[in-house]
Image: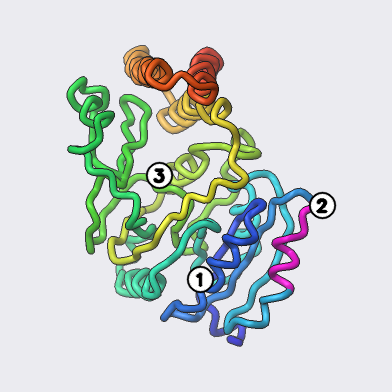
Amino acid sequence: MLSNNEILLTIVIPTYNRADYVQKLLFNLKDQIFCYFEVFVIDGSPVENKETEFLINSVKNDFNFSITYFRFSGGAAVQRNFGINKCKTKFVALVDDDILLDNSYFLNVIECFNLDISENIGAICGYNSNQYLDINKSFRWKLYKKLKLFSTYDPGKYDFIVGYPINRYLRPPHDNLVKIDFCGGGNITFIRKLIDTNIDLTFFKGYSILEDVYFMLKFSEKNNLYELGTAKCLHLHAPSGRQNGFKISEMTAINFKYVFRNIKKNLTLYNLFRFYIVQLFQLISLFFKFLKHPNIENLKLMFGKILGIIKSIKY
């Protein structure tokens, strides 16, 4: 086991009812070439669910890195902030419980930080190899481009005209260092001293969407965020612990509007017009999806979107 002076990185893993995925990730971390790290597992499961706690207690001595278990709820964003505040190391990484990392992931990330003599880099996210979305094979994105719904289609950029984050996985797998505006919180490493954990995330309490994009856009206002193509990983898309489709669809309007309002600050009538054109397009898409596959889940998605658009007006 490493001494505190040797540990350079704290890996924060927020989790909720996913003990089996946490176990897979811990054994995955065991294979990392870079080994100067510790792990914080932040468990947001209900108090009566002891699976993750029992798991950590039973396996924590099987690794060459320390594992510290915390029980703290409030949603992934709140759990991440809790873990960051407990961290005393130079670097802190946020890794979702359903991520698996290449064994050279942290070696490549830390090496990139170390080579940055001018301290231009504030944070580095990896690339989920199984999430590449070929824009030429996506009917939805081809239609987005044809209708010119967005002012930019640059992967990983935030459209400040329309209020929409452009999917960073529209960029094919690569081995480069690319500057971006945002990323998800699933795999990202920061210089600890640059993180402002006072960013108000109360709006996103509980299960939410876009909270990690909001956090990263706030971070990017003062610091540079990069995507490192050689820091590869896989996203397993664990289904457990997820909210129902109605709530998620509702949040695709409400949360997007909240982020737009708080990032852009002064929204013009043109901004609002462009924002709601996209929302209307997405609603029409859900309507046709329901016509093609008339089932209760697709009906929930459609009505969730309608209610979300109505509620979003006040934000």
Predominant secondary structure, magenta span:
helix
Kind of residue at disc 2: Glu
Front residue of 51/256: it is 51
Q: Is residue 277 left or right of residue 136?
A: right
Q: Which residue is mark 1?
A: 90
Q: Is residue 201 left or right of residue 183?
A: right
The Cα atoms of the two marked residues, 3 and 2, are separated by 40 Å
Tell which tag, 2 or 1, sits nearer the viewer: 2
Q: Of label 3 and label 2, which has the lower sequence position?
A: 2
Kind of residue at disc 1: Lys
Up/down of 112 relative to 74, above or below = below
Q: Is residue 149 visible?
A: yes
Q: Over which residues does the magenta segment extend?
A: 47-57
The Cα atoms of the two marked residues, 2 and 1, are separated by 35 Å
Q: Residues within 10 Å of mark 3 (few under 14, many from 20)?
A: few
Q: Which residue is mark 2?
A: 48
At 71% from the left edge and 48% from the top edge, which residue is drawn?
73
Quadrant assignment, res 83 = bottom right
Tell which tag, 3 or 2, sits nearer the viewer: 2
Kind of residue at disc 3: Glu
Q: Which residue is mark 3?
A: 221
Q: Residues within 10 Å of mark 2 (few under 14, many from 20)?
A: few
Label 3 SS: loop
Up/down of 250 relative to 216, above or below = above
Q: Residues within 10 Å of mark 1 (few under 14, many from 20)?
A: few
